[in-house]
Amino acid sequence: MDDVPFFDVQLPYELAVNIFQYLSRSDLGRCAQVSKTWKVISEDEVLWYRLCQQEGHLLQSSIADYSCWKLIFQECRAKEHMLKTNWKKRKGAVSELEHVPDAVLCDVHSHDGVVIAGYTSGDVRVWDTRTWDYTAPFLESEYEEDEPGMQPYVSFVKINCALAVAAYEDGILNIWDLRTGKFPAHRFEHDARIQALALSREDATVATASAFDVTMLYPNDEGYWHIGAEFEVQKLVDYLEIVPDTGRYPVAIATAGDLVYLLKADDAARTLHYVYGQPVTCLDVSAKQVAFGVKSLGWVYEGNKILVCSLEAERCISKLGNALGDFTCVNLRDSPPSLMVSGNMDRRVRIHDLRTDKIALSLSAHQLGVASVQMDEWKIVSGGEEGLVTVWDYRMNQKLWEVHSRHPVRHLAFNSHSLITANVPYERVVRHADLDSSTTHRRHRGLIHAYEFAVDRLAFQSTLPVFRSPFATMGGYDYDLTPTLPYDTVGAGRK
């Protein structure tokens, strides 16, 4: 007991740090109270930098970027706690992204807070909600019509960190490089209408399905776009997704009726799944798996299911659910490990446990079918056909809050501090148009909302939603809306 402690004299400092790296943040705090030597070791920058990386904070930073990583770790934890509290208590700000006059919203997509929207007028707009930029630029299409308003409808839009893509009703595909300008970097013409469009989240790979052909486009080493691969399928494609992190050769998954195809750029098309008379109703992919809903029909009714297939083994590994309604949406890529969330026409949101092939939780979330859904480590956000957006804490099996608008929620995407929702109408024609009523037009044309839960000034003062329009922001005004009322009722008094 009278000897000098082993760590203080005999053990080299580098080996002590190597041992301490296996401790949690609470254990490091306890070790800091043992002695001065242990305090120096437990507050080493390498240890706290690794803790930041392990918990997902500042992943793009190096250890030399900050001088005190323990303080940085504490600030990140405090911010994470604040964001979670704001989500639960509905504190923050919400913006309605400005619509295009005399046009109906056709499709919406977002990536990391950047939103792209296509309209019946042929216009394509992009907003950067990270900077509250309301002056959304139009992406030019370079159509040659002399008369305005003659451009075809926008069928699909996609966006990632560098590219924006739009497909039109006449089979035209425009690709913009967001870093170089608002004019298309590439224009591709299909002979028929484009049924499905996919864009890789990580790189510059675009996949389109037109007639019975699936085409993959990506730039070569010189930066020129070209057709990297073409595949012929037996039926019209319904859903199309690009598999992330596939290396040199891109891989896509396409569903056509009751067929599911595995499309590798360096190989021929292969059938991943096929059961006659059981069409696919939804699709999502991750780096190693693909999940799709299957509608059960025929003499032997087995119930509607979600099938999960391994991309490496190219076979089905799980059959999940047994619902009466059709599965309308599934989110595999963003879900926590071993979990997956799905939405169904029976108005329920389900969490599937991929380890046991059982339903971990089933929530009655909507009045009509579920149109879109996403989950993370503690919450679920779902959008319904009736226009309702619902936020759940699934660990507590508790609904946190909800907001309502007129049209189905066709797009939904969130991260730790923001939420993007899009209410896209079924019809692309405004009925009972009244040129003197801009409010009536806005309700019928579709809506895009951007929620921000990290707004410092409003985070502890206001309850969502606080309406922030470009005109209200310049004038310094905020309008408080009641989130549980239908948007038609609330918006009628706000011009």
Image (tube, rainbow, N blue to C red):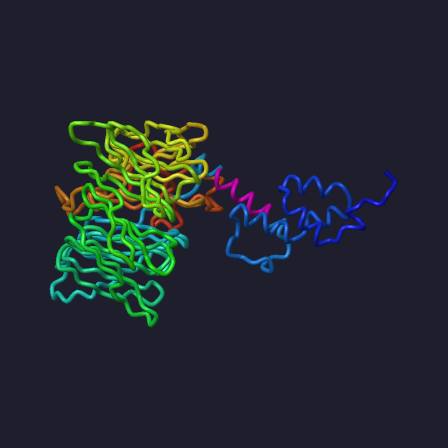
Tell me if residue 121 can be seen. Answer: no
Question: Does the segment drawn in magenta span residue 154?
Answer: no
Quarter of the figure that contains the C terminus: top left
Q: Is residue 349 left or right of residue 7?
A: left
Residue drawn at x 62%, y 52% as measured from the top left:
69
Quarter-of-image position of residue 188? bottom left
Residue drawn at x 34%, y 70% as measured from the top left:
221
Q: Is residue 269 left or right of residue 363?
A: left
Tell me if residue 322 can be seen. Answer: yes
Residue 471: image location, x then y, percent? 33, 51
Quarter-of-image position of residue 138? bottom left
Question: Does the segment drawn in magenta span residue 78?
Answer: yes
Residue drawn at x 22%, y 48% as measured from the top left:
105
Relative depth, front residue between 182 and 394? 394
Q: Main secondary structure of the magenta part?
A: helix
Relative depth, front residue between 172 and 414? 172
Residue 49: image location, x then y, percent? 60, 52
Quarter of the figure that contains the N terminus: top right
Residue range (magenta): 73-84
Residue 116: image location, x then y, percent? 30, 53
Residue 459: image location, x then y, percent? 47, 42
**Where 374 falls versus 345 (above or below)?**
below
**Where 100 falls versus 33 (above or below)?**
below
